[in-house]
Amino acid sequence: MQLRNDIRNIAIIAHVDHGKTTLVDQLLRYSGTFRENEHVDERAMDSGDIERERGITILAKNTAVKYEDSMINILDTPGHADFGGEVERIMKMVDGVALVVDAYEGTMPQTRFVLKKALEQKLTPIVVLNKVDRPNARPGEVVDEVLDLFIELGADDNQLEFPVVYASALNGTSGLEPDDQQETMDPVFNTIMEHIPAPADTREEPLQFQVTLLDYNDYVGRIGVGRVVRGSIKVGQQVVVLKEDGSQKSFRVSKLFGFIGLKRVEIQEAVSGDIVALAGMEDLNVGETVCPAEHPDPLPWLRIDEPTLQMTFVVNNSPFAGKEGKYITSRRIEERLLKELETDVSLRVEPTSSPDAWTVSGRGELHLSILIENMRREGYELQLSKPEVIIKEIDGVQCEPMERVQVDVPEEHTGSIMESLGERKGEMLDMANQGNGQVRIEFKVPSRGLLGYTTEFMSQTRGYGIINHTFDAFEPVIKGQVGGRREGVLVALEKGKASTYGIMNLEDRGVIFITPGTEVYEGMIVGEHNRENDLTVNITREKHLTNVRSATKDQTATIRKTKEMSLEEALQYLSDDEYCEVTPETIRLRKKILNKNEREKAAKRK
């Protein structure tokens, strides 16, 4: 069998924050892909606004670098468990993976998840031990941890013989030994060229091209990015796309794009092993196969893990609806959700009995909150219900998603963390003292027990703890109440502006969420109650003025700092009878039933 020795296809996988995108930056720099004087941003592959703000990769992206006489196609994947759908489909496009592991932190829950996916696809791994320049780095121990993980995940003999490269992506150094760091990326490039298999050269056979990622361009319409698995493809060629239901649609390839650095370049032809983007068909979808009309031969459909969390998206019907957003109708919201489905394979949108509400299912809170944040920035207004885990029936048994949780906490906080996760039906799997005052504990916890847990975890460890979790499996439902909020809320009595006087009178009742001057409406949540019941309060009340001088008149009224919530915190905070109202400028919490008397009647009926 002939091989294309001039090309390699590799995905870079790792736990979040272990340095994948920084490593890709250095590979781009040292390959000579950019001109000497060309300005390149840091984390050049993270092109989205939210990706840059949060410092995380959300969408998988591809780039290509030239090294000597060869071309290396590199796919940068997200490190966060909620975007696992992006990682799973990338595995079909590559022949090997570079597993990046932090030389101090070692293997983390997400390392296990992405490595498991790569080993299932029988891909050839290489290991890059990043951040070897960190104080307390422990390269020797971490290589042993990685080997243990390979064995635990059932790697075959060839996969266990993985080569290791030591690097500091931030400093642009690498070497084959931890102490021998040179300012070059050649050791990484050479390891890729030596160990990652070259794709087969089957350009004489009939074409097979599978769409793995989607993009859109105003000039050419929808663009399908994928790998030419077999044969060759030319601009102007007449081909058919094979749909999931078995139907075929024919189209002519209007444009072909190759990748070099961060740019797309127009090409005329691509052959087996190339990763390219093609345009010409408006109705392309992820997983579909493009073939010649006379030789339809579909590739296996991309299997993506099922969603584990769902929320209801509702049209905004609060008294302040339409004040800040551009798009508030059910038609606009539905169009936007269906558009998201075209590019996000791990998302599900289902209509409900109400024309103004949809059930949206995703891989986790972050997955759904990124979609909501994007909609909000585009000018949409909507309301969201409390996130709920998806219960599946497997072999006649009701099953719920379980997560593998790893916490790194100072020794003095281990007791309280074990107690709080125990209350949430967590089962301890492993515990190791790192010897530097830090303890690493592994748990298996039901996903519903982790909803809203991060805030409690941070306050219990005084901000010194690190928590990571990733989906493990569906297991039989654990009976009883798991997690959830214990405290009640303070609910506004009437519409108006919150006053300093009104807030001062409520400070001993709980924590206030809003500042003086904030517009409120009846039924809006303005704070958290100290007790378990909800309390309706008058936060708009003004101080009655008299013509008698007060002895304390000249003292300035001071109020405590109010608690502001991010979108994720607001979603985690919700209870069953509450909505989170999201507009381009504001995030508000409210009761589903705004009127106090009607709320009380509904509670009695319940």
Image (cartoon, grey):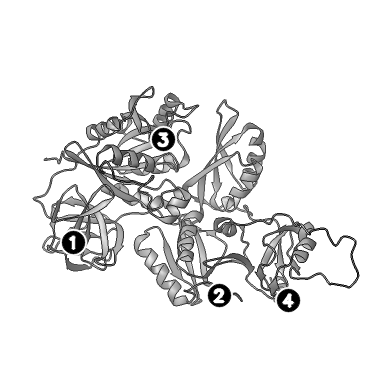
Label 1, label 3: how far apart the Cα atoms are: 38 Å
Q: Position of residue 512 (x, y in %)?
A: 70, 59
**Which residue has dot 4 on it?**
597
Kindly identify the residue that appears in the image at 50 percent across and 61 percent down.
Answer: 310
Crowding at mark 4 (Cα within 10 Å: few <14, some 14-19, many 20+): few
Numbered label attached to residue 323: 2
Q: Determine whether the residue tagged by mark 2 lies in a helix, strand or loop.
A: loop
**Which residue has dot 3 on it?**
101
Q: Position of residue 499 (x, y in %)?
A: 73, 67
In the rendered image, which quarter contains the C terminus? bottom right
Label 2, label 3: how far apart the Cα atoms are: 48 Å
Kindly identify the residue that appears in the image at 47 percent across and 52 percent down.
Answer: 53
Label 4, label 2: how far apart the Cα atoms are: 27 Å
Q: Is residue 535 above or below residue 93?
A: below
Label 1, label 4: how far apart the Cα atoms are: 63 Å
Amino acid type of the residue that numbered disc 3 sits on in the rendered structure: Val
Label 2, label 1: how far apart the Cα atoms are: 43 Å
Q: Is residue 288 above or below residue 496?
A: above
Disc nearer the start of the sequence (3/4): 3
Q: Quadrant of residue 196?
A: top left
Q: Is residue 569 above or below residue 376?
A: above
Disc nearer the start of the sequence (1/4): 1
Disc nearer the start of the sequence (4/2): 2
**Which residue has dot 1 on it?**
255
Does residue 165 appear in this view? Answer: no
Disc nearer the start of the sequence (2/3): 3
